[in-house]
Amino acid sequence: MKLLIANRGEIAVRVIRGCREMGISTVAVYSEVDRRSPHVLMADQALPIGPAPAAQSYLAIDRILAAARASGADLVHPGYGFLAENAAFAERVEATGLIWVGPPPDAIRLMGSKTESRKLAVSTGVPLIPGLLEPLADLAALETFVDEHGLPVLLKAVAGGGGKGMRAVRDRSELGAAFDRARSEGGAYFGDDRVYVERLVDRARHIEVQVAADQHGNAVYIGERECSIQRRHQKVVEECPSPVVDPELRRRLGEAALAIVRGSGYRSVGTVEFLVGPDGGFYFLEMNTRLQVEHPVTEEVYGVDLVREMINLALGRELSWRQEDLKPRGHAIECRVYAEDPLRGFAPSPGRITLLVRPGGPGVRVDSGVYQGSTVPLDYDPMVAKLVVTAPDRPAAVARLRRALQEYQVRGIATTLTLFRALVEMDEFAAADFHTGFLDELLASQRLAELHGRQDPEAEEAAAIAAVCLATLEAGSVAADPFAHAEGSHWWREGARRLHGRFPR
């Protein structure tokens, strides 16, 4: 059996690892700039699909299907992003005689429409934020909604996702510009410029429920994830379980999620997302008809393998678990490591990674799509890795995350590790006192920048030096005397000087 991964980066690596454990051969596809990427090197077979622009490679359905036919693949896994929630792609895969590792195309199409999925929520009795069930006809319709429901409101692209095509409006004078911008982003990112509106729930938490359903009528929810730390509606830190969800709320959220699963005819692994207000009330947001970026925290806490399960479900097998089997154990936190510079307005930071030292030790997992020497291109999403820590409880997980972040060293590009090192020192983070607007408010207030500025630059430099030494020693390229390399790079010279001062020969 052979599976083609229609994606790149860390998710392609994750799927390859899952397939290898299942005895399934893998086929990678790659654009010209990804020729030497880890997923290409790890797969059993790799085929080129075009130049760097995604529209000519990872979004080019005909090229991906041609690669699948040429490789003799039996299954196609879309990962997340790119074509993962494209119903037409799923239909084309199935029409070619291949097995689509995902939900039925009709379910993708239904849940991919924010307005149609809201109608489903109403029909199944799942709580919904007050808003329109049809796209806005024009600006006048938006103004009428505001007259009836007041401000603030949230504009969303009908086919949106990942924070794209979303605009919060708190002042009536901003309605026109926000409406135009949401439409423009919807058209640019999803080929659909329709927009709808709903009331904005202030200081809410973003809680999502992991679900899985087979072709035999069985469905389960696998706990929830806390996804409230976001920058411009894009998640950057996720946790499992949520610090504010007790067993009763977990049950109610899970049952609501399963109502959406059954109502949509969903079969596969997926996620149903909710907002939870300060009063504990919850409201349906949307369903992601794919594997989520943050799936590792659920895997760590519930002891499941969601990639393996997704493949098994596509092969027509029954669910591996019953609802009563799924109990949370411990606490996991994930940080998305982006090639962005938080100290320069999150400017993209493409380039060659000259040093990469991943953290290790108990309860530390790094899902990565790069290696030392990799070049991070500007052509795709800037996420290069996910750092996941797991511990018996949340305080222990926070302490472990703090330690792992200090060990994690990347040079050659800027990353959001800088942001996370400052974030984990905040009292609000330790107390889990945050909401969906928390990080944006912090960035606007400069508090995170001030906290970063108070960090000891000597300690950061020393950590980088130690990382260089450790990486080189582990690579087996240093003789018994590491000071022999003192004539090399600046870091080696400085590292040798400092080490010699503390431990003279």
Image (cartoon, rainbow, N blue to C red):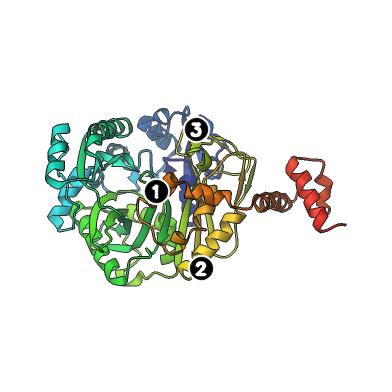
For disc 1, the marked residue is: 441
Mark-to-mark CA distance, 2 and 1: 27 Å
Mark toward the start of the polypeptide (1 vs 3): 3
* Residue 77: percent from left, percent from top: 39, 45
Helix, strand or loop under label 1: helix
Q: Amino acid at mark 1?
A: Glu
- Front of the two marks 3 and 2: 2
* Disc 1 residue crowd, few under 14, some 14–19, many 20+, Cα 10 Å: few
Helix, strand or loop under label 3: loop
Question: Residue 283 lies in what quarter of the image?
Answer: bottom left
Circle 3/circle 2 CB separation < 8 Å? no
* Residue 431: percent from left, percent from top: 43, 64
Q: Which mark is residue 414?
A: none
* Residue 342: percent from left, percent from top: 50, 43
Helix, strand or loop under label 2: helix
Can residue 138 be seen in the rendering of this structure?
Answer: no
Q: Amino acid at mark 2?
A: Ala
Name above or below for residue 332 compared with residue 289: below
Name above or below for residue 323 compared with residue 443: below
Viewer-proximal residue among 61 and 187: 187
For disc 3, the marked residue is: 378
For disc 2, the marked residue is: 396
Which residue is pictured at 20% across the width and 59% down the height?
Answer: 259
Viewer-proximal residue among 27 and 263: 263
Can residue 456 be seen in the rendering of this structure?
Answer: yes
Q: Amino acid at mark 3?
A: Leu
Mark-to-mark CA distance, 3 and 2: 36 Å
Question: Residue 353 lies in what quarter of the image?
Answer: top right
Mark toward the start of the polypeptide (3 vs 2): 3
Q: Which quadrant, please, contains the C terminus?
A: bottom right
